[in-house]
Image (cartoon, rainbow, N blue to C red):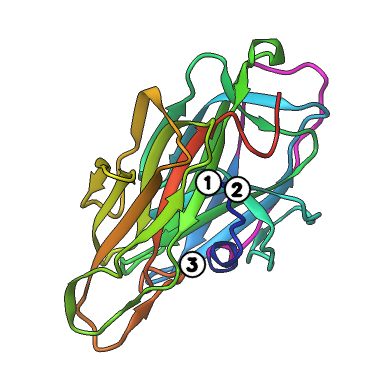
Amino acid sequence: MRRIVLGTVAAVLLAGCGAGAGKKSTALPSSVTIGIAPWTVQAGEDRIWCKTMKVPFDQTIDVSKFTIDMAPGSHHFILYRTTANLPDGFGDCPAMGNETFVVGSQNPGTFAFAYPQGLAMPLFAGEQLVLQSHYVNASNAAIQAKVDVTMDLIPHSEVTNYVETFLIPDTSFAIPPQTFGYTDGGKNQTETPGLNILSISSHMHKRGTLFTIAEIGATSSNNLFTTTTWDAPPIKVFDPPLVTDASKKLHYQCTWDNETTHTIHFGPTTEDEMCIMVVTVYPALDYAP
């Protein structure tokens, strides 16, 4: 599995940004919570917001578990890191394109994901974070949005490997109007040998009806993941991990229904569509303990 530079995905996912680094400390707690304070989503509003902040510590923190809690109305939340230097704030996301995925949730309410013993996701001292939240208010009244991200920390001495999560998109599809059960045939992602796949998942929008992931070899094909749920897809965890092999590929494919009179393309709003495979591996390709 090669390193994925988000590029186009970043450009369309990031349309909004927000506030405040915390007080630095050399004594690390057992857990820390960051998030976005409550804000108002107007009736009928479909929008992406972001909060920008720095990691609030002067040393790397090693996260063994993320718990994400979102108020009703959320489409997704993503925590990114980026090499950009951004002012603290909240509102529209800046044009970026160089951010990488840390963790996210598509589950309304509370979602928790813990890594196996010895594995952790690092957040580096003072690095730039972008907390991106997409809310869709289909009601006739304003709602209150809110996101909290609680991170359980472990001592660095307990870390055996760092994990990394990649968003691997299919951005080239065009769903014809008045077409049902459409697929563009999907995409192949060649595996990088020497990695352990910890989990896989998917991301589509409301016209997505099926997402599949299969591992394909020269003479074999093994289905790994199937979901018909676009808004809160499951996460498939491998125990033991799935070991990568340079002779194999991950084939991912989306199916959509388009009841409209226009062609639908890849894009950020719920009226656009997406087809993204989410893969968490270790050891990480871009950093090491």
Q: Tell me the residue at 40%/43% (across/down).
A: 248
Q: Which mark is first along the chain, 2 or 3? A: 2
187 or 48: which is nearer to us?
187
Per the image, label 1 sits on a secondary structure element best described as strand
Q: Main secondary structure of the magenta part?
A: loop
- Indicate the amino acid at tag 2: Arg
Q: Tell me the residue at 52%/35% (across/down).
A: 193
Q: Where is residue 13 drawn, in percent x and y?
A: 53, 63
User: In the image, is 179 to the left or to the right of 186?
Assistant: left
Whether pointer 1 and pointer 2 mark residues with C-beta atoms closer than 8 Å, the reply is yes
- Indicate the amino acid at tag 1: Phe
Quarter occupied by residue 222: top left
Quarter occupied by residue 274: bottom left
Q: Within the magenta stretch, is there residue 27?
A: yes
Question: What numbered label is drawn on residue 116?
Answer: none
Q: Name the residue under label 1.
A: 166
C-alpha distance separating marks 3 and 2: 29 Å
Q: Residues within 10 Å of mark 2 (few under 14, many from 20)?
A: some
Is residue 272 visible in the rendered structure shown here? yes
- Kindly give the residue lying farthest to the front in the view shown: 219
80 or 134: which is nearer to us?
80
Magenta segment: 13-34
Is residue 72 visible in the rendered structure shown here? no
Q: Tell me the residue at 68%/39% (across/down).
A: 286
Question: What numbered label is drawn on residue 47?
Answer: 3
101 or 151: which is nearer to us?
101
Q: Which mark is first along the chain, 2 or 1? A: 2
Q: Name the residue under label 2.
A: 3
